[in-house]
Image (cartoon, rainbow, N blue to C red):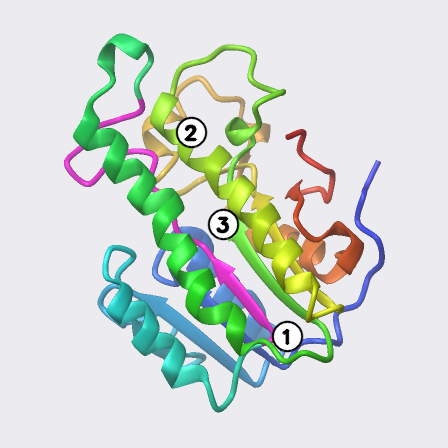
Amino acid sequence: MNDVGHSDAGWLQSAAVFGASGGIGSALCEALAERGIERIFAGSRKGKAAAPHLTVPFAFDLTDEDSIEAAADKMRDDPPQLVVVATGALTLPDGTGPERSYKRLDVAAMEQALRLNTVGPALIAKHMLPLFPRQGRAVFAVLSARVGSISDNRIGGWHSYRASKAALNMLVRNWSIELGRTHKDAVVVSLHPGTVDTRLSEPFQSGLPAEQLTSPEDAAANLLRVIDGLVPEQSGGCYDWKGERVPE
C-alpha cells in the first residue's frame, strides 16, 4: 500500500541538491533536468557537478558551516522549492566500516558518523529552511535509511550508522513541527531510497539478490515520485522509495 497522499509533478521550478556528485545526487540532478526544471543548484565538496551544463554548481562541506551558509546565501534571491540532502556515510573516509558489535565502538568513529550523517544535514536545514516562502509548496528531504528505525531493528549492529540515522529522523520530525507553524504547505521528510548501486553500498552488496539492488537512475525516479506525492500532513515522517511509511 502506498501511503503518499497525491500526485503532482507540476509544482516545481527550482531545486537544490546537496551531494550532487554522488550516485543518487547526480542521478537526481539528471532527472530534474529531464523534467525541464528551470534552475538546479548542485552542491558538492569541489563545487563540480556531474552535469554542469544542466545545473548551477556550488561548493559546500558538511563539516564546515561557513561553506553551507555561503551556499544558502547564493540561493537567497532565487530560493529552491525543493531541497534534497543526498549525502551520507556508511564507510568513513579512512575505511572504517559499520561496527558489527558494541565491542568495536570507537569514540572518534562515532563522532565522525554523527557529524556526517546527522550534524551536517542539520546545518543544511538551519540555513536552507529559512529560504522557503511562507506561501506555496516547498519540500525539504534528507536521505535516511530503514536501519534508522528503532522499532524495525531486528538484528542490531551498525551502531553508529543506525544511531546517526535515527537521530536524523528525530530532527526531521522537529523541523517539520517548527516549520509547520509558519509554512502550512511545506513538507519536511526523510527518505529511504532502498539499496542503491553506489559507492556507499558497494562493500555490502556481496550475496545481495539482484532484484534488491536499484540503479541510481531508478532510485532518483522513485524518490521524485514520492516527493511529488507528499502532502503537508505527512511532514515529519520517513518514507521509503515506494512511498510507504518507515516505522519509527
Asked if the residue under mark 2 is in contact with the one under mark 3, i.e. CB atoms within 8 Å, the reply is no
Amino acid type, residue under disc 3 in the picture: Pro
- For the question of whether residue 50 can be seen, the reply is no
Height in image: 154 above or below 124? above
Q: Nearer the viewer, residue 37 or 70?
A: 70
> What whole-number distance in Å separates the C-alpha atoms at marks 3 and 2?
25 Å
Relative image position of residue 5 (x, y in whole percent): 84, 53
Numbered label attached to residue 163: 2
> What whole-number distance in Å separates the C-alpha atoms at marks 1 and 2?
36 Å
Earlier in the chain: of badge 1 and badge 2, it is 1
What residue is drawn where x is 39% and y is 63%? 20
Relative image position of residue 152 (x, y in whole percent): 61, 20
Question: At numbered mark 1, what does the secondary structure look like: helix, strand or loop?
Answer: loop
- Name the residue beneath numbered marker 3: 216
User: Which residue range is magenta in the image?
Assistant: 81-98
The furthest residue to the left? 94
Height in image: 8 above or below 244? below
Question: At numbered mark 2, what does the secondary structure look like: helix, strand or loop?
Answer: helix
- Name the residue beneath numbered marker 1: 35
